[in-house]
Image (cartoon, coloured by chain):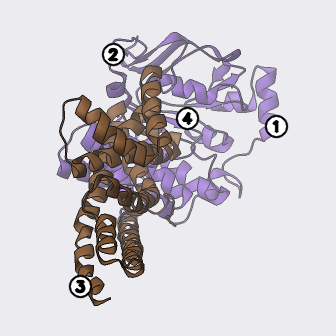
């Protein structure tokens, strides 16, 4: 028992890797997801079809399959030797991008047509209309959905133990196997994930409140 | 085109599918003039207005702003739209911007004015429509309908438009808020701001218009001095329309002057 307890800080350190996976994945997913959403709303038929295939693929294949596919298949075939961590971040990002694009697409489509028409009426170009009028509103609308994406990605990051990334679950398993005590390490890990989910959600809620505009969704 | 004609439309046609909304509309507005378009719902009034700044693309016909043909596909329509003020029935203020920012954004992003000059112009425009300083930092949702519409007028006005187009500017307002908006439009007209107004407010039209154009079934069927069109029209459809909506002079409780909010006067 006491040996297990002395290993807990070791599990705790896994948070660095877990955060690298989650925030790396979220950031990459944002960089991919936002342009994909814009393309899905404003693009021509060809662009829309192409983006739909991307979304359809990454939403349709289980994460664990994507991880194996890219780590053992796609990247080696491309002659790239990427670490388990890098591969995991890229895969989480590509997958989250597909989900985030749908959050942003919904948000963009929920901006009233009148906003766009008004922007044009004062002489804005299509590009200015999107950057100055549509996106500032859509991104605010998207924050709650995006908060959810954080919570999902946090828990999905645990699956990266399959590639041996030194995140929380990998370390937990390591402690459990080497000490022969299973219950306590997994309870500890479970509580850790709950706390991280809760804390992250709180932080995003603060951001949401800070940027909330009266009259937009959730405003009053 | 006469030198003081600032907006001219020639033979505009527009269909949505099989429905012909505009069937050959022509009009011109001279600098400083105020013209009013009236007519029953579905006559094509809003479509006509949107065709004038090409928010809707006419199928046929031409539009000129001063000496530039807007319907020429080679022109930069965005740039030219900045010179036509447009006021929407539903206000369409930008939700994420304060009253002041709503007026400023066109000046900074479209006209590329330096910030302090944009700020000065925006404040001036807001004061012109009687939006006082205490409201400048409010978001649209924190304003009344009448205040929203006046900010929307200021947003259009600040761009120094050649002409202002008003698309039923008071139709979405509660009755007690109509007066303050009509008052502002009237003041602008008297200051010489060129305007084309679609409205159902007969009293207001009588007060403000140099000419009323009556639209019916996609055409302007009659045009002339306000008194003549309202009280002594030549066409049967026009007479029936004004009989239906009623003719009053702008003095009574239901007349426009009775509805102007005391804070404005």
User: Label 3 near label 1: C-beta < 8 Å?
Assistant: no
**Whether labels 2 and 4 share one chain:** yes
Quarter occupied by residue A151: bottom left
SS at badge 1: helix
What is the x, y in percent for residue B117?
Answer: 20, 48
Task: Single out the mark in the foreground, 1 or 3.
Answer: 3
Judging depth in this view, the residue of B78 and A105 nearest the camera is: A105
**Label 4 to label 1: alpha-carbon separation:** 20 Å
Per the rendering, the mark at residue B20 is: none
Q: Chain of mark 3?
A: A
Chain letter, purple in picture: B
Q: Chain of mark 4?
A: B
Judging depth in this view, the residue of B65 and A129 nearest the camera is: A129
- Residue for badge 4: B197
Categorize mark 1 by other alpha carbons within 10 Å: few (<14), some (14-19), many (20+).
Answer: few
User: Label 4 near label 2: C-beta < 8 Å?
Assistant: no
Q: Chain of mark 2?
A: B
- Residue for badge 3: A6
**Label 2 to label 4: alpha-carbon separation:** 26 Å
What is the x, y in percent for residue A206?
Answer: 37, 71
Q: Is residue A34 visible?
A: no
Categorize mark 2 by other alpha carbons within 10 Å: few (<14), some (14-19), many (20+).
Answer: few
Quarter occupied by residue B68: top left
**Label 4 to label 3: alpha-carbon separation:** 79 Å
Which tint is chain A? brown
């Amino acid at each position: 028992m006491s040996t297990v307890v002395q290993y807990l800080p070791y599990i705790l350190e896994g948070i660095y890797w877990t955060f690298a996976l989650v925030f790396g994945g979220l950031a990459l997913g944002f960089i991919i997801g936002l342009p994909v959403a814009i393309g899905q709303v404003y693009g021509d038929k060809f662009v829309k079809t192409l983006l739909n295939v991307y979304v359809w693929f990454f939403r349709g294949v289980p994460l664990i399959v994507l991880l194996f596919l890219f780590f053992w298949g796609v990247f080696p075939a491309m002659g790239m030797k990427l670490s388990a961590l890098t591969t995991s971040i890229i895969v989480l990002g590509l997958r989250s991008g597909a989900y985030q694009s749908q959050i942003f697409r919904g948000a963009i489509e929920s901006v009233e047509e009148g906003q766009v028409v008004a922007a044009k009426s004062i002489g804005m170009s299509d590009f200015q209309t999107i950057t100055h009028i549509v996106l500032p509103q859509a991104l605010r609308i998207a924050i709650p959905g995006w908060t959810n994406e954080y919570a999902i990605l946090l828990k999905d990051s645990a699956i990266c133990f399959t590639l041996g990334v030194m995140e929380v679950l990998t370390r937990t398993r390591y402690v459990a196997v080497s000490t022969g005590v299973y219950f306590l390490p997994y309870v500890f890990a479970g509580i850790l994930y709950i706390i991280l989910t809760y804390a992250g959600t709180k932080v995003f809620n603060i951001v949401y409140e800070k940027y909330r505009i009266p009259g937009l969704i959730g405003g009053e | 085109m006469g030198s003081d004609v600032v907006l001219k439309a020639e033979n505009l046609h527009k269909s949505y599918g099989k429905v012909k909304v505009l069937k050959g509309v022509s009009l011109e507005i001279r600098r400083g003039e105020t013209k009013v378009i009236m007519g029953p719902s579905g006559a094509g009034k809003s479509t006509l207005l949107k065709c004038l700044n090409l928010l809707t693309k006419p199928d046929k016909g031409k539009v000129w702003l001063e000496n530039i043909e807007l319907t020429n596909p080679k022109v930069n329509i965005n740039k030219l739209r900045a010179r036509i003020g447009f006021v929407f029935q539903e206000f369409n203020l930008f939700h994420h911007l304060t009253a002041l920012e709503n007026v400023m954004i066109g000046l900074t992003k479209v006209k590329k004015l330096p910030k302090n000059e944009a700020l000065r112009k925006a404040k001036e425009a807001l004061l012109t429509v009687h939006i006082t300083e205490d409201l400048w930092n409010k978001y649209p949702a924190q304003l009344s309908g009448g205040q929203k519409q006046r900010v929307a007028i200021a947003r259009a006005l600040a761009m120094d438009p050649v002409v202002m187009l008003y698309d039923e500017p008071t139709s979405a307002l509660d009755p007690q808020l109509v007066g303050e908006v009509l008052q502002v439009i009237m003041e602008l007209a008297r200051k010489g701001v060129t305007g084309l107004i679609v409205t159902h407010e007969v009293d207001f039209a009588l007060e403000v218009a140099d000419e009323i154009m009556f639209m019916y079934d996609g055409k302007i069927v009659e045009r002339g001095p306000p008194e003549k069109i309202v009280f002594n029209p030549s066409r049967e459809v026009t007479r029936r329309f004004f009989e239906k909506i009623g003719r009053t002079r702008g003095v009574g409780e239901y007349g426009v002057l009775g509805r102007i909010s005391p804070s404005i006067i």
